Image (tube, rainbow, N blue to C red):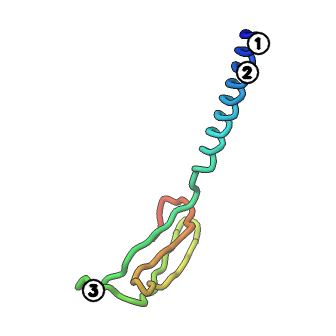
Amino acid sequence: MYELFVKRIGKSLIGIFAVFCVIVSVSSVFGQVTAGNLQGMVTDPNGAVVAGATVRLTNPESGFVRETTTSSEELYNFTSLQPSERYV
């Protein structure tokens, strides 16, 4: 009887371990990020923050162009940018 109990526990532990391995390997796939964000502040030559400024982001390699205006907190924010070697 004891041997049967040990076999069942052993099979259960193997099953639990297998499920754990699958969960860990699948969760790492969702951790991959394929886009980035860029945030900043526009200032004049004296260091004063410029509100309502238009900011243009360009990728010369792909021809990508996006514009935004600084927010009420005087920040600009570009989201969901694709990886590239250069944005200007």
Give the quarter of the figure containing the N terminus.
top right
Residue 17 x %, y %: 66, 29
Which is nearer the N-term, disc 3 or disc 2?
A: 2
Neighbor class of circle 3 (other Cα within 10 Å; few <14, some 14-19, many 20+) is few
**Residue that appears at 40% across and 74% down:** 40
In this orientation, which residue lies closer to the viewer: 45 or 77? 77
Q: Is residue 54 left or right of residue 11?
A: left
Q: Is residue 67 above or below residue 14?
A: below
- The answer to the question of whether label 3 and label 1 lie on touching residues, with beta carbons closer than 8 A, is no
Q: Is residue 21 above or below residue 57?
A: above
Q: In this view, does 54 lie above or below 25?
A: below
Amino acid beneath label 3 = Ala
Q: In this view, does 26 lie to the left or right of 45?
A: right
In this orientation, which residue lies closer to the viewer: 73 or 78? 73
Q: How far apart are marks 3 and 2 (CA)?
A: 68 Å
Mark identifier at residue 48? 3
Amino acid beneath label 2 = Lys
Which is nearer the N-term, disc 3 or disc 1?
A: 1
